[in-house]
Structure formats: C-alpha cells, structure tokens
Image: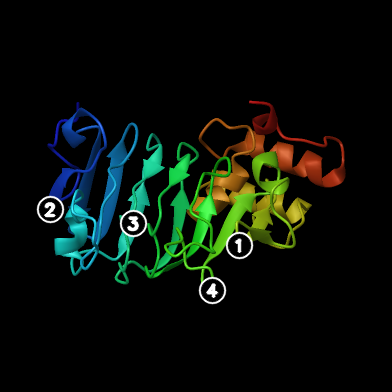
C-alpha cells in the first residue's frame, strides 16, 4: 500500500484513485505549485461526469479542486487512465507525457480537457476511437506523438492518423525535432548531460538512447555514431 505522507512539498489535497486494493494502489496529490501527480502501480478507477446517466460510478476526486492545479503528471507504474478522469478539465493546459506503463486509456478520459499534445513513451495503448460518441481525446484539436522506432505505433499509423487521431512520430535521438538524427543532436545531448541545458520530458525520453534512465556522455556518443552511420540502432531498441 501507499503511505500518504510525507511529501517533498506542501500539499493542497490528496487521496486515492486506484481500481484495486480499495483504491489504494494509486494516489493523487495536488501540490502548492499547482501540479496534480498520480503515482502507484496498476489501474486507475473509472469515473463518470455531471449529467451522466451512469449511477454506479463517482466523479473524479480532483474535480472539486480544478482551480488548484493546471499541470498533470503521471508517474511510471500506472497501467490505465480511467474513463472520464479528466473530462472537461480545461484548467489543465499544455502537453502531457504518458508513461510507457500505460496500456489503456478510457472513454472520454481527455475529451474537452485543456491538453492538446500527448507524448507516448511506450507502446500504443488501447483507446476509444475518435469516431466514438465519447472518444478518449479530442480528435479535432489533439495531437498524439509517439516514438517512431516503436512498431506498435508505426505499423498502425496511416497517413498520420491512428484510430482517427492525428499522430506524429519522433525519432530516438532527434532532440531538436527536425525529424533527423544529426551530429547537432549529439551536441544537444552533451549539453543536457553536462547540465547546461534542461530538457523537456520528451527530449529526455528521446535522448536516453541506452535506456538507463539518464542522459550521459554515453548517450551523446551513441547519437553521434548513429548520425554518422556507424550504428543503425540504439541499445534501448533491444531492451
């Protein structure tokens, strides 16, 4: 189980949101910086929304605190994101990294949320299709980004569409987003390794090409070697 205290920063609200162990397999925390973090292991509970005819589910517990957070973080270990969990959460803006542990995203989960860019660190999850009455995302507004080297995505995306959603691939080692892995990307990785540049979460995922959870001089070397053609894949692709 999870021990709900203490945390590294002051907490505005917290609780449980898991589908197992009386909900205690996952915990949610809103901190004083306006960040909602969900962590733990396993599946999230499914929820409903105000006005729904479903009577056997409750509202997501953070709905009462929507004025207290504007950023969402999922930690690795979560395997599903529940139905309607962030439906109409327009207070959450910007982008969101979906950890590689997530395998399922429920219906209506991010519909009409303020998030418009989703970055997937792992395999393509099970989602509600864009043509559904309650799709997992907003098909007209949202863009899904995936690691192009991942065949669960690349083999199911056609004409930049996946289940009706706009989906764009990013290459491992491509830290400047130009759809190429060049020596300059190795230089960028070296700046990150030397702590002279703070990477975005997506840059960190694309730059950790040896899969050790860090960007180091070793990653810089792999990216440089890939750029000049002395290797044709990264160690993380074989893990």
**Callout in the foreground (4, 3):** 4
**Callout in the foreground (1, 3):** 1
Q: Nearer the viewer, residue 125 or 54?
A: 54
Residue hosting label 1: 164
User: Is 46 positioned to the left or the right of 97 in the image?
Assistant: left
User: Is 190 positioned to the left or the right of 58 in the image?
Assistant: right
Distance, label 3 to label 2, CA atoms, is 14 Å
Q: Nearer the viewer, residue 177 or 117?
A: 117
Find residue 213 and report its horizontal and vertical position in percent: 51, 34
**Element under label 1?**
loop
Q: Does residue 191 lie above or below 87 as drawn?
A: above
**Element under label 3?**
strand
Residue beneath the point at 40% across and 37% down: 79
Distance, label 1 to label 2, CA atoms, is 36 Å
Q: Earlier in the sequence, mark 4 or mark 2?
A: 2
Residue beneath the point at 56% across and 59% down: 144
**Element under label 2?**
strand
Residue hosting label 3: 72
Find residue 50 and report its horizontal and vertical position in percent: 20, 66
**Would you call the spot at circle 4 few (<14 residues within 10 Å), some (14-19), or many (20 or more)?**
few
Which mark is drawn over residue 13?
2
Q: Earlier in the sequence, mark 1 or mark 4?
A: 4
Circles 4 and 2, Cβ within 8 Å, touching? The answer is no
Residue hosting label 4: 140
**Callout in the foreground (1, 2):** 1
Find residue 105 and report its horizontal and vertical position in percent: 43, 48
Q: Is residue 31 visible?
A: no
């Amino acid at each position: 189980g999870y021990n709900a205290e203490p945390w590294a920063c002051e907490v505005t609200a917290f609780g449980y949101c898991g589908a197992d162990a009386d909900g205690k397999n996952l915990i949610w925390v809103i901190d004083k910086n306006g960040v909602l973090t969900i962590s733990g292991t396993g599946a999230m509970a499914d929820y409903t929304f105000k006005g729904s005819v479903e009577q056997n589910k409750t509202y997501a517990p953070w709905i009462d605190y929507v004025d207290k957070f504007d950023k969402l973080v999922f930690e690795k270990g979560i395997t599903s994101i529940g139905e309607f969990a962030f439906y109409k959460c327009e207070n959450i803006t910007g982008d969101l990294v979906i950890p590689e542990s997530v395998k399922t995203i429920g219906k209506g989960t991010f519909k009409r949320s303020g998030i418009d860019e989703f970055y997937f660190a792992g395999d393509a999850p099970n989602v509600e299709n864009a043509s559904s009455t309650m799709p997992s995302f907003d098909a007209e507004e949202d863009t899904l980004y995936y690691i192009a080297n991942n065949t669960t995505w690349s083999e199911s995306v056609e004409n930049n569409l996946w289940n009706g959603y706009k989906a764009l691939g990013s290459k491992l080692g491509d830290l400047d987003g130009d759809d190429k892995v060049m020596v300059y990307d190795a230089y960028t990785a070296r700046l990150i390794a030397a702590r002279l540049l703070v990477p975005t979460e997506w840059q960190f995922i694309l730059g950790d090409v040896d899969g050790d959870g860090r960007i180091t001089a070793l990653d810089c070397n792999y990216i440089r070697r890939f750029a000049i053609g002395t290797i044709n894949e990264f160690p993380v692709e074989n893990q």
